[in-house]
């Protein structure tokens, strides 16, 4: 029984008691009205209705009327069927967005939520815990960038890592992609995609993963004087690194991952995507723009802390670098590969010279100071200009 009907029944029982006492002249009309919590004039109106229609005269007619705003039964059934057949398991906010965008839904969010909860299709959310003080967001976009990864079954029977690079000030995600396992290369990729589209940022916030930091003692402080390959690259770019020491410290990224874990698998399943390549294409072209449109916030201050790259060779910084000494046969040994340095018009040979090997996602290179001596594929084979032209032509053909 609804609260309104319960109050109506209580009112009827109290009126019978007050009316009987008044008739026996035990109490006055004013006292009877006080017993009912109304004025004496209203009590006299109750008497008139009671004498004309009996107890039915006391019923509030509004309780028997159907609201003009009440949705037709077929509309409620259509909503329930749509959710069961196409969006089963989606949370209400996610479903409501699609309900409005693709199914011409015009009801408000609260109505949709209540109808789904009434029919047991979604559970009522737990009451939120006590509010705790949190760190304020950065004031400007580009002041602080978060990066983190989440291991999850994004498609059935496939556990991959989702690497996300996000702005602290706005919650805008600048880079998101799936990899088999996160590491230095995936972190480089997230930073590179951010810099290429927006510029160099001020600080970088992450957990104490081994590719971000060297930590001498498990669970202890990071060693800022002994940077990893990733730390060395950010130092070269002038970006400050900040280590988080607990999951709570990364609360924004942790909460964001919960949203991705809830939404992305359902979206991929809806599109019938089960492979990593198509999944990454879907994320870039469809899911990420839609996600940012929904969850991006306005920064506290106008403007941006991003600065232009000014032709800084980003790719040659965001890569693995290792120093090597050239052997007597003018070759360099790197990870069980022999890299032959080709003839050079600047020097007859580089025997015993100190060079640096750069490892990228798709190849290798040898540098002597700032000058590149040669490019190689991941197997260590020298890439000549002719091969490079053939490869670029093949790539262009494939793209077209």
Image (cartoon, helix red, strand yellow):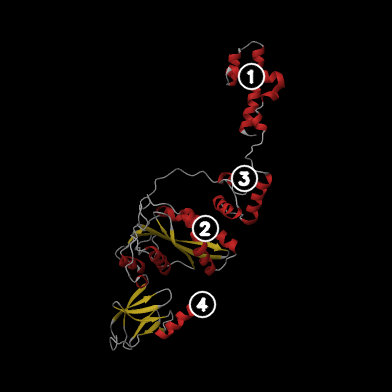
Screen quadrant of the N terminus:
top right
Snapshot quadrant of residue 33: top right
Task: Residue lying at the far top in this picture: please name it.
Answer: 25
Q: Give the CA distance from mark 2 to mark 1.
A: 61 Å
Instruction: State how far apart marks 3 and 1 are (Cα).
Output: 39 Å
Secondary structure under tag 2 reads helix
Dot label at residue 261:
2
Image position, residue 146 (x, y; %): 40, 58
| Residue under the image location 64 percent in, 43 percent down | 71
Tell me which numbered mark, 3 or 1, is placed earlier along the sequence: 1
Q: Which residue is mark 4?
A: 398
Q: Label 2 vs label 4: CA separation?
A: 33 Å
Q: Earlier in the sequence, mark 1 or mark 4?
A: 1
> Can residue 159 be seen from the camera position used here?
yes
Circle 1 sits in a helix, a strand or a loop, which is it?
helix
Q: Secondary structure at mark 3?
A: helix
For the residues labelled 4 and 3, the Cα–Cα distance comes to: 50 Å
Q: Which residue is mark 1?
A: 45
Distance between the Cα atoms at labels 2 and 3? Answer: 25 Å
The residue to which callout 3 is attached is 115
Q: Indicate the secondary structure of the residue bearing disc 4.
A: helix
The mark nearer the N terminus, 2 or 3, is: 3
Task: Answer with the quarter of the image where residue 375 lies.
Answer: bottom left
**Depicted 16 relative to depicted 303: above or below:** above
Residue 96 has which mark?
none
Q: Earlier in the sequence, mark 4 or mark 3?
A: 3
């Amino acid at each position: 029984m609804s609260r309104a009907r319960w109050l109506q029944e209580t009112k009827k029982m109290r009126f019978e008691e007050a009316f009987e006492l008044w008739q026996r002249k035990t109490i006055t009309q004013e006292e009877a009205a006080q017993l009912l919590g109304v004025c004496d004039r209203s009590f006299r109106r109750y008497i008139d209705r009671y004498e004309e229609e009996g107890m039915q005269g006391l019923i509030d007619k509004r309780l028997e009327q159907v609201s003009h705003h009440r949705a037709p039964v077929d509309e409620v059934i259509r909503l329930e069927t749509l959710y069961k057949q196409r969006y089963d398991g989606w949370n209400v906010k996610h479903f409501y967005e699609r309900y409005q965008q693709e199914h011409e839904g015009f009801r408000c969010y609260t109505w949709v939520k209540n109808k789904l909860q009434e029919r047991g299709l979604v559970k009522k959310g737990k009451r939120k815990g006590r509010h705790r003080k949190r760190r304020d967001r950065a004031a400007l976009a580009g002041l602080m960038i978060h990066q983190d990864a989440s291991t999850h079954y994004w498609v059935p029977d496939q556990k991959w890592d989702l690497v996300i690079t996000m702005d602290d000030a706005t919650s805008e995600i600048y880079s998101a992609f799936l990899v088999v396992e996160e590491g230095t290369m995936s972190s480089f990729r997230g930073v590179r995609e951010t810099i290429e589209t927006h510029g160099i940022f001020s600080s970088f916030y992450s957990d104490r993963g081994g590719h971000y930091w060297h930590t001498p003692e498990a669970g202890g402080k990071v060693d800022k004087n002994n940077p990893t390959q990733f730390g060395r690259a950010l130092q070269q770019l002038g970006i400050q690194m900040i280590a988080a020491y607990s999951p709570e410290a990364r609360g924004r990224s942790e909460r964001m991952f919960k949203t991705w874990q809830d939404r992305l698998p359902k979206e991929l399943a809806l599109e019938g995507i089960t492979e990593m390549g198509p999944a990454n294409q879907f994320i870039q072209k469809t899911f990420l723009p839609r996600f940012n449109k929904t969850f991006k916030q306005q920064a506290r201050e106008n403007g941006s802390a991003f600065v232009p790259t000014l032709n800084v060779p980003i790719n040659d910084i965001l890569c693995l670098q290792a120093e090597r000494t050239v052997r007597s046969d003018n070759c360099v040994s790197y990870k069980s590969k022999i890299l032959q340095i080709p003839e050079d018009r600047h020097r007859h040979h580089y025997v015993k010279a100190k060079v640096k090997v750069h490892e990228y996602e798709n190849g290798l290179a040898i540098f002597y100071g700032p000058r590149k001596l040669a490019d190689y594929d991941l197997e260590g084979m020298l890439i000549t200009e002719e091969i490079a032209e053939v490869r670029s032509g093949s790539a262009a053909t494939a793209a077209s």
